Image (tube, helix red, strand yellow):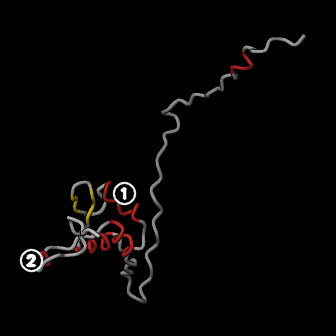
């Protein structure tokens, strides 16, 4: 069996290439993140996650992967109150002010259906 002319991106061939950053394909990133490869490619296409583009292919380094994980990390809300201090009352969200008399209201009226205006079948004999 013949060896491929170009070795895969995931396997360094010499010690000199071992110093280069390892680039992951979207399928490998998806396996680490627990999502689909389609999601990874879609987010990269829409420029929502960091990536490197080699030709038309998306590749991800270790730094990219760490940044993607940080971007989608959710932390619990920090409770800044001290125990024993009463909670401040919650303010109501501001409501939109609607001027009542400033805008005249127009009553819309439905148009009669076309089939009622002109019978397409004529009258029955």
Question: Where 125 falls versus 82 (above or below)?
Answer: above
- Residue tagged 2: 16
Quadrant in which the N terminus is drawn = bottom left
Compare residues 81 and 7 and report the one nearer the observer.
7
65 sits left or right of 20 in the view: right
Q: Are marks 1 and 2 in contact (CB under 8 Å)?
A: no
Q: Nearer the viewer, mark 1 or mark 2?
A: 2
Q: So how many labels did they put on this image?
A: 2
Of all residues shown, which one is farthest toward the left? 16
The residue carrying pointer 2 sits among few (fewer than 14), some (14 to 19) or many (20 or more) residues within 10 Å by Cα, namely few
**Circle 1: is it few (<14), some (14-19), or many (20+) Cα within 10 Å?**
few
Residue 32, image x, y percentages: 36, 76
Residue 14: give x, y in percent of width and height: 13, 77
Q: Give the percent coordinates (x, y) of residue 18.
A: 14, 78
Q: Nearer the viewer, residue 22 or 16?
A: 16
> On residue 2, which mark appears?
none
Quadrant of the snapshot with the C terminus: top right
Percent x, y of residue 15: 11, 80
Residue 111 located left or right of residue 89: right
Kindly state the secondary structure of the residue where label 1 is placed: helix
Cα distance in 3D space between marks 1 and 2:
33 Å
Closer to the N terminus: mark 1 or mark 2? 2
Find numbered disc 2 in the image and state the secondary structure of the residue it sits on: loop
The residue sitting at 36% across, 68% down in the picture is 27
**Viewer-nearest residue: 58 or 15:** 15
Q: Residue at x 53, y 29 (%)?
A: 104
The dot on residue 42 is 1
Rendered residue at 76%/15% (across/down): 119
């Amino acid at each position: 069996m013949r060896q491929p002319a170009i070795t895969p991106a995931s396997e360094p061939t010499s010690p000199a290439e071992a110093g280069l950053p390892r680039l992951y394909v979207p399928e490998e990133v998806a396996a680490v993140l627990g999502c689909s490869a389609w999601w990874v490619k879609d987010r990269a296409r829409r420029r929502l996650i960091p990536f490197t583009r080699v030709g038309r292919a998306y590749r991800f380094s270790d730094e990219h992967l760490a940044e993607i994980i940080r971007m989608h990390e959710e932390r619990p809300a920090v409770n800044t109150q001290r125990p024993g201090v009463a909670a401040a009352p919650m303010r109501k969200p501001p409501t939109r002010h609607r001027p009542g008399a400033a805008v005249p209201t127009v009553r819309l009226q439905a148009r009669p259906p076309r089939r009622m205006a002109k019978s397409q079948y004529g009258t029955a004999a």
